[in-house]
Amino acid sequence: MKKLLFLPLIVLSMGVFAQKFQLGIKGGVNISNFTNSNFDHTSLIGFHAGGILAFLIGNNFAIQPEVLFSTQGARINSGTTKNDYKVSYLTVPVLAKYRFNGGFYLEAGPQVGFKLNENIPNNQSINTFAKNLDLSIDGGLGWHSNGGFGIGARYCIGISKVGNFDATVQPGYDPNFRNGVAQIFVFYTLFNNYRDH
């Protein structure tokens, strides 16, 4: 947890050394599911929304932290019923972003998610479904106009378990499943007059 406290300091130091920046908002659709699992499940549709701050390094490269509200989870088929397991997170991705001259870009970086709440079916064997901290690696692509409008798509690959489950409570179920989230979004930034060409 102490390491997470250094994240704002890292972002602040990038702001000191960066020559220019962009500030913006974004929002879009989440298509989430559980990965690395051996039970029957399907995707859930949710959303994400929040703010972005891009520290620009030259014409093409940027470090872009974001703070987003994100709804995630999956629909699990227990054999007789299908139940939605929903978890809401405050996610903080920090992405390295390379923008080509035509406006298209690629991005990748780590993400930390802080659980805000969960909505799961009544289950006497589960006191808390999701852990308070969720870690993932993000990668994506998109297009960003010189005027500030942009569209993009991103996939967030979970690298930490969704919850701390005991395999003996649900025999036959792999407890090591992770979040997987595909995101499609639009965004708009201010302070866009930074490119030399």
Image: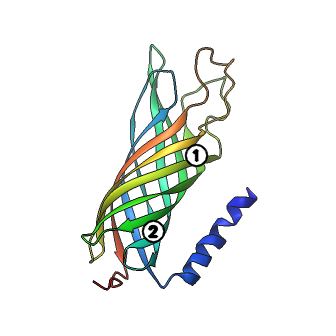
Say which of 135 and 78 sits in front. Answer: 135
- Residue 130 horizontal/vertical position (percent): 61, 38
Q: CA distance from mark 1 to mark 2?
A: 23 Å
Q: Amino acid at mark 2?
A: Ile
Q: Which residue is mark 1?
A: 117
Q: Does 2 appear above or below 99?
A: above
Q: Does 52 appear above or below 106?
A: below
Instruction: Determine the secondary structure under disc 1.
Output: strand
* Within-10-Å neighbours for mark 1: few <14, some 14–19, many 20+: few
Left or right: residue 139 versus residue 133 is left
- Residue 125 horizontal/vertical position (percent): 67, 23
- Of labels 1 and 2, earlier in sequence is 2
Q: Quadrant of the N terminus?
A: bottom right
In the displayed orientation, state which residue is furthest to the left: 102
Q: Does 26 appear above or below 17?
A: above
Left or right: residue 2 versus residue 11 is right
- Residue 20 horizontal/vertical position (percent): 45, 83
| Quarter of the view holding residue 21 | bottom left
Left or right: residue 76 versus residue 194 is right
Q: Which residue is mark 2?
A: 52
Q: Residue at x 48, y 59 (%)?
A: 68
Mark in front: 1 vs 2: 2
Q: Residue at x 68, y 31 (%)?
A: 127
* Within-10-Å neighbours for mark 2: few <14, some 14–19, many 20+: many
